[in-house]
Amino acid sequence: MIEEKQAATYNGYTSIIVLLALQLIRLAIVLSMPVFFNFVFGFLGIIVFICWFGFFMVAPNQGRVMQLLGKYVGSEMREGLRWANPLYMRAKVSLRVRNFESEALKVADSNGNPIDIAAVTVRKIVDTAEALFEVDDYENYVTIQSEAALRNLATTHPYDAQDDDGDITASGEINGGGDRIFIETTNSDINIERVD
């Protein structure tokens, strides 16, 4: 299992100043040195030019997952202008709170009565690396896991119980079990946080 780690990135504004200074120093050396050194510093100029492609923006509540030649090298969640190795591939992952409303599912409760049940799931990504690398499509994963948990909930509780064991009311609450139903999936492969 991949664990999220901080990528080696730098402040973008500081990096702009450093790259501009390197360009000016290289230009001054090329103009004042013999022709042999022009070739060496010309090559360094190409490297500095490639470094300009390492800039990227991170918006609020957004993360960037970085890979180098297919290997995970880290994630960046600090917002603003950042600079990293220009060879890194950077994928965006939204860390914003998202809602998912399931379709009405026809299931049988624990007494065998057919009922229609639906749920609204509010969640957000906590670990960007797991969300990107542990499942094919984390949006679809959350959808399927939410519907599976909802089906499990409906089949383990009666819709209308005769005792106080906890029944599912028409408003979606479990009597005797609190005001809200909290669905926790077991064996979760990615770190997604339920938002209350």
Image (tube, helix red, strand yellow):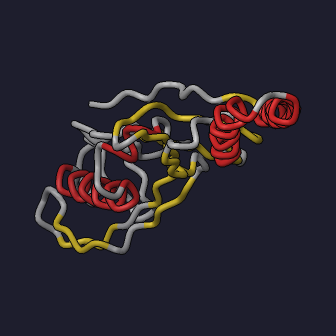
Residue 65 pos. (x, y %) = 49, 42
Q: Is residue 119 left or right of residue 42?
A: left
Q: How many marks?
A: 0
The image quarter containing residue 48 is top right
Task: Note whether residue 67 is visible.
Answer: yes
Query: In the image shown, does 192 or 118 lie closer to the viewer?
Result: 192
Residue 11 pos. (x, y %) = 75, 30
Residue 66 pos. (x, y %) = 49, 40
Q: Is residue 88 left or right of residue 50?
A: left
Q: In this view, does 35 lie above or below 103?
A: above
Query: In the image shown, does 46 or 94 lie closer to the viewer?
Result: 46
Quarter of the image that includes the C terminus: top right
Query: In the image shown, does 190 or 36 lie closer to the viewer?
Result: 36
Name the residue rendered at 41%, 46% in the picture: 181
Name the residue rendered at 63%, 45% in the picture: 50
Name the residue rendered at 41%, 61% in the picture: 119
Task: Note whether residue 58 is visible.
Answer: no
Q: Is residue 82 above or below residue 112?
A: above
Residue 91 pos. (x, y %) = 50, 51
The image quarter containing residue 169 is bottom left
Quarter of the image that includes the N terminus: top left
Name the residue rendered at 37%, 48% in the picture: 174
Q: Is residue 23 above or below residue 49?
A: above
Query: In the image shown, does 2 or 39 lie closer to the viewer?
Result: 39
